[in-house]
Amino acid sequence: MARWFPIGNVVLVILGVSVYFGLLHGVLDRMRLTDRAALAAIVAIIVGSFFTVPVIRGANELSINVGGALVPVALAIYLIVTADQVGERIRAAVAAALTGAAVFAIGKVVPVDEPGVGFIDPLYIHALFAGTVGYLSGRSRRAAFVAGSLGTVLADIAHYLEVSARGLIRTRTALGGAGAFDVTVVAAVLAVALAELVGETREFLSAGRRRGREQIALRAPERGADSSGESVQRSDSAGDATGKSEDGPATERRQPEI
């Protein structure tokens, strides 16, 4: 079956242009990556997609594509190692395991080698699913990338182990076999995009609520001053009505005796 147009190529080109013009500086800064490092990773993915390294030979062959798996996995490991907190590292690893299990499960329902569902290639169904699960389990941008990239590779490894355990099927498993257009790359980019969209939306809403509380706090002293002024006026009126002044009680006037 001929694959549909490889959208991974388009995604990488758009990312490269965006990084070059500094449009993704905020996202890369949160992931502890410089613009130069991101561009180098994109170029390495594209160039590395032409190279495949054999790992296991025999009835069930296993190989790894440099651009489709090796570079994204190396980048994911770097993000785990450079995480500030141990909890974030654990969350990223758990998210990768959950994403791998989810992709492996959906592979049973929608195999990659089956014809496309409508106009969507099964390859991209796996990518969309992996990216969504990667974000939901990772939450942060760093953990989402780790989940999207490592998770799909773990799913491919689980598939290879399952086929090898049966010992009945001669197969060839290529991790990241579609190069830069593989599920690994598309899923990682989608997971980070979802994390960025949701994160920016939450920050915008929280900033709006914070501005609202500040405005209420600024209005409170003004209302307090108005209330105190009204109370002073009421006390003055009461003093006039009882014949008292601020200097003390009013003295009673006596009529002269005749």
Image (cartoon, grey):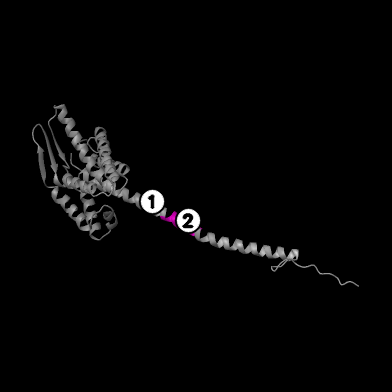
Q: In terms of sequence position, does the residue under pointer 1 or pointer 2 come before the other?
A: 1
Q: Residue at x 39, y 54 (%)?
A: 204
Q: Quadrant of residue 123?
A: top left
Q: For residue 213, which numbered disc appears in the image?
A: 2
From mark 1 to mark 2, how far is it between C-alphas?
17 Å
Residue 209 in the magenta stretch? The answer is: yes
What stretch of residues is rendered in magenta? 207-216
- Which amino acid type is shown beneath numbered disc 2? Arg
- Which amino acid type is shown beneath numbered disc 1? Arg
Q: For residue 202, which numbered disc appears in the image?
A: 1
Quarter occupied by the N terminus: top left
Q: Dot 2 lies on which element?
A: helix
Q: For residue 25, which numbered disc appears in the image?
A: none
Q: Report how many numbered discs are placed on residues in the image.
A: 2
What is the x, y in percent for residue 45? Answer: 17, 50
Q: Nearer the viewer, residue 111 or 88?
A: 88
